[in-house]
Image (tube, rainbow, N blue to C red):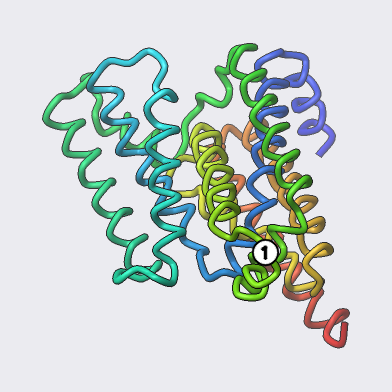
């Protein structure tokens, strides 16, 4: 145990490890904020669907040899997020079916492009790294960290500033609309925030594991608390804790970053479920 802590402390002396910690904590924090809203609105898998959209857009950007893939990936993901949220109730294709269609279609389209116009000799490795995360979180530059910090600050600010409206839209859209709230505008805001979070999180856990980063902290917090505010705060704390423990364990044990963080989130969910059933049953 002491040797493991000594190794972690030694690794923390390197700037790239500190960069990974900063980015991982910020992404975990942002991911947890809207997780509660997505779960309550029955859009738990929207993170998974949008991550596949981002994968397809990233494949297109790679084929086009774009140096900054975010220029293409972010707007495409935002557009699809808006379409998915709008299809939740009024469209002919309901939300769950729309997510499945876009998810599978984008994933297949992206993989097809990467095979028809390969950008490297190791296609399988590129696809696996994109889907399940890679060591790119440990090769971040200072500019990447600052970009993540700026986007994270914007996400947190927007969530806190529009917290009451997001709360209204989450629980009762009809009541919010009757009080004069422009529900569509806040759907757009939620969609943009989700898209930004998805693009940021791809380097941390990969496109297939992003939904776990969004959903597990919210579900864990719901095992213990029942008010929207308490669940949101607890979700943020659990998400940051899981990301920090997962990153430290991954660095010390040389395990995959993304899957390690998700595994820690699963364990946290199990612990919260037990605590909720034993101590908070009547809360």
Q: In which quadrant of the rendered view does residue 34 lie?
A: bottom right
- Measured as percent of width and height from the top left, residue 76 is found at 37, 37
- Measured as percent of width and height from the top left, residue 110 is found at 24, 38
Q: Residue at x 64, y 38 (%)?
A: 27
Secondary structure under badge 1? loop
Name the residue tied to disc 1: 180
Can you say whether 16 is above or below 58 in the image?
above
Can you say whether 41 is above or below 205 in the image?
below
Is residue 214 shown left or right of residue 281?
left
Can you say whether 228 is above or below 48 in the image?
below
Front one among 180 and 86: 180
Q: Residue at x 59, y 67 (%)?
A: 39
- Measured as percent of width and height from the top left, residue 120 is found at 24, 19
Q: Residues within 10 Å of mark 1 (few under 14, many from 20)?
A: few
Q: In which quadrant of the rendered view does residue 91 lie?
A: bottom left
- Measured as percent of width and height from the top left, residue 105 is found at 24, 51
Q: Residue at x 81, y 24 (%)?
A: 9
- Residue sticking out furthest to the left: 116
Q: In which quadrant of the rendered view does residue 232 lie?
A: bottom right
In the rendered image, the quadrant that contains the N terminus is top right
């Amino acid at each position: 145990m002491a040797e493991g802590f000594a190794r972690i402390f030694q690794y923390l002396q390197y700037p790239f490890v500190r960069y990974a910690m900063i980015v991982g904590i910020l992404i975990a924090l942002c991911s947890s904020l809207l997780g509660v809203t997505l779960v309550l609105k029955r859009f738990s898998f929207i993170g998974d669907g949008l991550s596949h959209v981002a994968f397809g857009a990233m494949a297109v950007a790679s084929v086009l040899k774009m140096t900054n893939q975010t220029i293409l990936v972010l707007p495409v993901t935002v557009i699809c997020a808006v379409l998915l949220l709008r299809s939740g109730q009024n469209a002919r294709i309901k939300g769950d079916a729309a997510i499945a269609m876009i998810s599978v279609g984008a994933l297949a389209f992206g993989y097809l492009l990467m095979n028809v116009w390969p950008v490297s000799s190791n296609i399988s490795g590129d696809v696996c790294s994109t889907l399940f995360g890679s060591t790119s979180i440990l090769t971040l530059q200072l500019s990447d960290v600052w970009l993540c910090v700026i986007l994270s600050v914007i996400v947190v600010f927007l969530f806190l500033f529009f917290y009451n409206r997001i709360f209204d839209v989450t629980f009762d859209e009809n009541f919010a609309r009757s009080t004069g709230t422009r529900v569509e505008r806040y759907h757009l805001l939620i969609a943009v925030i989700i898209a930004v979070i998805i693009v940021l999180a791809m380097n941390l856990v990969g496109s297939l594991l992003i939904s776990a980063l969004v959903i597990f902290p919210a579900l864990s917090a719901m095992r213990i608390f029942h008010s929207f505010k308490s669940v949101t705060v607890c979700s943020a704390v659990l998400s940051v804790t899981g990301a920090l423990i997962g990153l430290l364990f991954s660095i010390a044990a040389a395990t995959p970053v993304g899957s390690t963080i998700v595994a820690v989130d699963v364990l946290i969910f199990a612990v919260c479920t037990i605590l909720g059933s034993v101590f908070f049953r009547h809360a």
